[in-house]
Image (cartoon, rainbow, N blue to C red):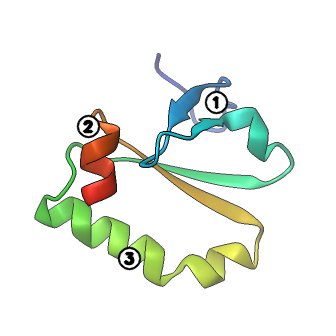
Amino acid sequence: MKLSLNQLAPNFSLPDQNGKLHHLSDYQGRYVLLYFYPKDNTPGCILEACNLRDNSVDFSKYDTVILGISADSTVSHNEF
Protein backbone atom coordinates (compact mmCIF):
# COMPACT_ATOMS: atom_id res chain seq x y z
CA MET A 1 0.00 0.00 0.00
CA LYS A 2 1.42 3.36 -0.98
CA LEU A 3 0.63 6.36 1.22
CA SER A 4 0.62 9.97 0.13
CA LEU A 5 2.12 12.85 2.06
CA ASN A 6 -0.09 13.74 5.05
CA GLN A 7 -2.30 10.66 4.52
CA LEU A 8 -3.17 8.84 7.73
CA ALA A 9 -1.68 5.38 8.05
CA PRO A 10 -4.15 2.48 8.17
CA ASN A 11 -4.45 0.56 11.42
CA PHE A 12 -2.06 -2.38 11.61
CA SER A 13 -0.86 -4.91 14.17
CA LEU A 14 2.71 -6.21 14.43
CA PRO A 15 4.69 -8.04 17.14
CA ASP A 16 7.64 -6.37 18.85
CA GLN A 17 10.97 -8.00 19.64
CA ASN A 18 9.38 -9.78 22.62
CA GLY A 19 6.38 -11.06 20.67
CA LYS A 20 3.96 -8.52 22.19
CA LEU A 21 1.40 -7.42 19.61
CA HIS A 22 1.17 -3.66 19.01
CA HIS A 23 -1.72 -2.02 17.17
CA LEU A 24 -1.35 1.42 15.67
CA SER A 25 -4.67 2.26 17.31
CA ASP A 26 -3.00 1.69 20.72
CA TYR A 27 -1.25 5.02 20.18
CA GLN A 28 -4.29 7.06 19.17
CA GLY A 29 -3.90 10.68 20.29
CA ARG A 30 -0.09 10.48 20.25
CA TYR A 31 2.42 11.13 17.53
CA VAL A 32 3.91 7.99 16.05
CA LEU A 33 7.23 8.00 14.22
CA LEU A 34 7.35 4.89 12.05
CA TYR A 35 10.69 4.08 10.58
CA PHE A 36 11.16 1.26 8.13
CA TYR A 37 14.51 -0.41 7.74
CA PRO A 38 15.65 -3.31 5.53
CA LYS A 39 17.53 -5.58 7.94
CA ASP A 40 18.51 -5.94 11.59
CA ASN A 41 22.17 -5.61 12.59
CA THR A 42 23.39 -3.80 9.48
CA PRO A 43 25.60 -0.70 9.84
CA GLY A 44 23.10 1.80 8.42
CA CYS A 45 20.18 0.39 10.38
CA ILE A 46 22.20 0.39 13.61
CA LEU A 47 23.17 4.02 13.03
CA GLU A 48 19.54 5.00 12.38
CA ALA A 49 18.21 3.11 15.41
CA CYS A 50 20.91 4.54 17.70
CA ASN A 51 20.21 8.06 16.48
CA LEU A 52 16.51 7.67 17.27
CA ARG A 53 17.31 6.10 20.65
CA ASP A 54 19.75 8.89 21.51
CA ASN A 55 17.09 11.49 20.71
CA SER A 56 14.17 9.65 22.34
CA VAL A 57 13.98 12.15 25.23
CA ASP A 58 13.36 14.96 22.74
CA PHE A 59 10.68 12.92 20.98
CA SER A 60 8.99 12.08 24.29
CA LYS A 61 8.61 15.81 24.99
CA TYR A 62 6.18 15.84 22.06
CA ASP A 63 4.39 12.66 23.18
CA THR A 64 5.92 10.72 20.28
CA VAL A 65 6.39 6.97 20.27
CA ILE A 66 9.03 5.50 17.93
CA LEU A 67 8.32 2.22 16.16
CA GLY A 68 10.79 0.50 13.84
CA ILE A 69 9.57 -1.98 11.26
CA SER A 70 11.43 -4.52 9.14
CA ALA A 71 10.66 -7.93 7.67
CA ASP A 72 13.04 -9.70 10.07
CA SER A 73 11.83 -12.15 12.71
CA THR A 74 11.04 -11.20 16.31
CA VAL A 75 14.11 -13.25 17.36
CA SER A 76 16.30 -11.17 15.05
CA HIS A 77 14.71 -7.95 16.40
CA ASN A 78 15.45 -9.03 19.97
CA GLU A 79 19.13 -9.57 19.14
CA PHE A 80 19.21 -6.21 17.32
Amino acid type at image mark 2: Asp
- Numbered disc 3: secondary structure: helix
Give the CA distance from mark 3 to mark 1. Answer: 24 Å
Q: Secondary structure at mark 1?
A: loop
Amino acid on which the number 1 mark rests in the picture: Ala
- For the point 24% across and 67% down, the residue is 46
State the SS at label 2: loop
Give percent across and percent down for residue 43: 13, 66
Identified at 65% across, 23% down, the residue is 10
The residues bearing labels 1 and 2 have C-alpha atoms spaced at a distance of 21 Å
- The residue that mark 3 highlights is 51
Find the distance from the CA under tag 3 to the CA under tag 2.
Answer: 20 Å
Indicate the amino acid at tag 3.
Asn
**Rendering coords of residue 45 (x, y %):** 24, 60
Q: Check if mark 3's residue and mark 2's residue have beta carbons within 8 Å.
A: no
Instruction: Give the percent coordinates (x, y) of residue 32.
Output: 66, 52
Q: State which tag comes first along the sequence, 1 or 2.
A: 1
Q: Which residue is mark 1?
A: 9
Q: Name the residue at 46% across, 48% down.
A: 18
Mark closer to the observer (3, 2): 2
Left or right for 73, reference 52 = left
Return the residue at label 2.
72
Neighbourhood count class around disc 1 (C-alpha, 10 Å): few under 14, some 14–19, many 20 upward:
few
Q: Residue furthest left?
A: 43
Q: Quadrant of residue 6?
A: top right
